[in-house]
Amino acid sequence: MIIAAFAGTGKTTLARLYPKRVIDFVSMPYKYYLSEDNEDLSHSEAEASKANFDHVIREDWPFNYVEAIKKVLHDDKVLLIPSAGNVLSLLKKENIPYYLCYPVKEAKEEYKRRFIDRGNTIDFLSAFIDGWDRFIFALENDTYGTHIIMKPHQYLSDMIIDIGEISVAIEKQEVPGSPESDSDELKRVKAELAAIKQRFGLDKQEKFLNDHANITLKEFAAMLHGRDCQPGMTTDELLLAKQKGFVVVYGDSDDRVEFEGAIRAEGHTNPLVKDQPAGVLVLSEDGELLDEGSDLYVEHIMKNSNVINVFYCSKNGFNWAFESDIPHETFITYDGGYDEEYADFDDGFARCIVFEVSSLKD
């Protein structure tokens, strides 16, 4: 079992808590040419050496690391590895499953504090904090791994209970020996796999996704209707949106528009003019938010293609409202949640939209 965890989530601590079951499979000896002095560093010294631009990267990285993972993968262990994109790509190519554990994007300041407290360098902070949005975006859009999203103050040890008592099952459920003699062993493996999923809450996640596998865009919009201000989608709903290719568009603060689901992006609106769009956002056919004034942006504006008009405090009484040529469904959020007293849509907080990424035009 592999858990690919973001920096600062507590891999080292979890391995220390459960030494018989958990391995912090450190990547530095595979990534860099290290001197003998570097190989015997204390924990604090090792942290201080991370993201050191003086290190020389090995020519066979990350292939050597993935090969090493494969050699220990079938042991009765949990392997904790970094969530490096090139490593994850190779695991996917090898059809090796992994759990992907990372924080919500709002946890940036908490993780900056963690990095400073554990002795990481300015170079490390520059890499991970300055590149925070890019890292989290990439992890959010990983469609292969099973996602475990952590709240700002959570650690891996908070999320995995009594893992030392679990005999870890191989995800592929490959049990050696003949089918006749292994029937009981196969049952045991399946039971242990179910126990692991239950501890992560993944059994409920799988049930939710299976129960809503055939959900329509209109039904998904109805699921979000009536919530308090921003939709506040759960992890399961976000994964469902990604699987179905749904994109939810809503407003946050007074100038920021969020795209969540199959597209994860953030747009900004212009100064407000009453009864006129506060901003005009345009998407490419691939779901990329186009830079205002670019040739492709202007081309889509001229064709009225993939254009989203954003209204703030000026459209039918809504704080936020969206209009678009993209085929979509609409849902309403309310200040304080839905109440019979505010059944009229015009009394809502925001009129949001949800569309399918496949509806975007070239």
Image (tube, rainbow, N blue to C red):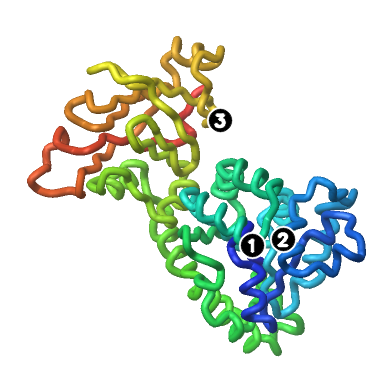
Q: Give the residue furthest to the left.
A: 341
Residue 286's tag is 3
Q: Which marked residue is nearer to the observer: mark 1 or mark 3?
A: 1
Rendered position, 70 above or below 227: below
Q: Is residue 103 visible?
A: yes
Q: Indicate the amino acid at tag 2.
A: Glu
- How crowded pointer 3 is (Cα within 10 Å; few <14, some 14-19, many 20+) is rated as few
Please state which of residues 187 and 355 is positioned toward the viewer in this rendering. Answer: 355
Residue drawn 49% across and 24% down? 361
Which residue is disc 2 drawn over? 47
Residue 279's tag is none
Q: Indicate the amino acid at tag 1.
A: Arg
Q: Are marks 1 and 2 in contact (CB under 8 Å)?
A: yes
Q: Which marked residue is nearer to the observer: mark 2 or mark 3?
A: 2
> Element under label 1?
loop
The image position of residue 208, as x and y in percent, is 41, 61
Which residue is disc 1 drawn over? 118
- CA gap between label 1 and label 2 equals 7 Å
